[in-house]
Amino acid sequence: VDLTGGEPTIRRDLPEVIAYAREIGYETVCMITNGLVTANKARLRSFVDAGLYDILVSLHAHEANAHDMLTKMPGAHRKVLKTLENAQAIGLHLRVNHVVTNTNYQDVGKLAGLVAPFKPYALNFIVFNPTRDAAEMDKQLGTTYHDVAPVLKEAIECYTSEIPTINIRHLPFCFLKGKEKHVKTMWQLQYESAEWDWCMDIIHK
C-alpha cells in the first residue's frame, strides 16, 4: 500500500496508520513524501518502527536553488538530501521521483549522479505532463520530447550500473530507441511490482 496525499507526513497519527496497515495484512507499506519531515532521523525512524518498508522521495533538481524554486520551499533541497541520507543509514528501501521540466531537463544526469551514492533501488524520471490542474503550468514548465529524450538516454547509459531501476514516465517509446525497457508510462504494475495497481485505483474511485 502507498501512503500518499498531498503529503502524508502532516498527519500526526502517521505511525498509527502505518502500524494499522501492517496489522490488517499489508506486507509492504510505502510512503510517498516531499522529504521535509523525514529530514528528522528520529521521525523517520518512528515510521520504520511502525512498519514502514519503502520510501519514495521527490527531488526535482540537483541544485538547491532550482529545487527550492520549483517547490516554493526555501531549504527544501537540503532537507531532501538529509532524508536520503537517513533512509540509507536506517536501511530503508529508497526510491526517488524527479519531474522533468524545461527548467531542469538539461541536468537530469547530474541529478542521477547526486542520488546514486544514496543507493536508491529506483529513480523515476517523470516528464512533465500537463493534464488536469497542471495544464495551466504548461508554458512555464513544459518541454518537448525531442529536447528531453537525449539527456534521459544519456542518464540511463551513465547510471544503470549504479541505480538498479531507472524508469521514464510520459515519454513515447520511439524517443528512446534501444532503451524502451525503461519507458514505464501506463499500467505500471505489470512492469514494476513496486508501482500502483490501476485496477484497484479505479475501483476505489
Image (cartoon, rainbow, N blue to C red):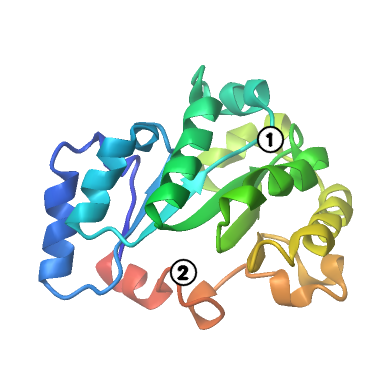
Distance (Cα) linking label 1 and label 2: 24 Å
Q: Badge 2: few (under 14), some or many (20 or more) residues near its Cα, within 10 Å?
A: some
Return the residue at label 2.
Answer: 195
Query: Residue at the location (70% across, 69% down)?
Result: 183
Q: Is residue 166 above or below residue 135?
A: below
Given residues 130 and 103, the one toward you in this image is: 103
Outermost residue to the bottom: 190
Instruction: Inspect this view and state whether residue 129 appears.
Output: no
Given residues 30 and 91, the one toward you in this image is: 91
Given residues 179 and 146, the one toward you in this image is: 179
Q: Is residue 167 above or below residue 49?
A: below
How far across and down, in percent of the image, does residue 75 sit? Answer: 51, 19
Amino acid type of the residue that numbered disc 2 sits on in the rendered structure: Glu
Tell whether 2 sits left or right of 189.
Answer: left
Element assignment for label 2: loop
How far across and down, in percent of the image, does residue 78 sit? Answer: 53, 26
Return the residue at label 1.
Answer: 62
Element assignment for label 1: loop
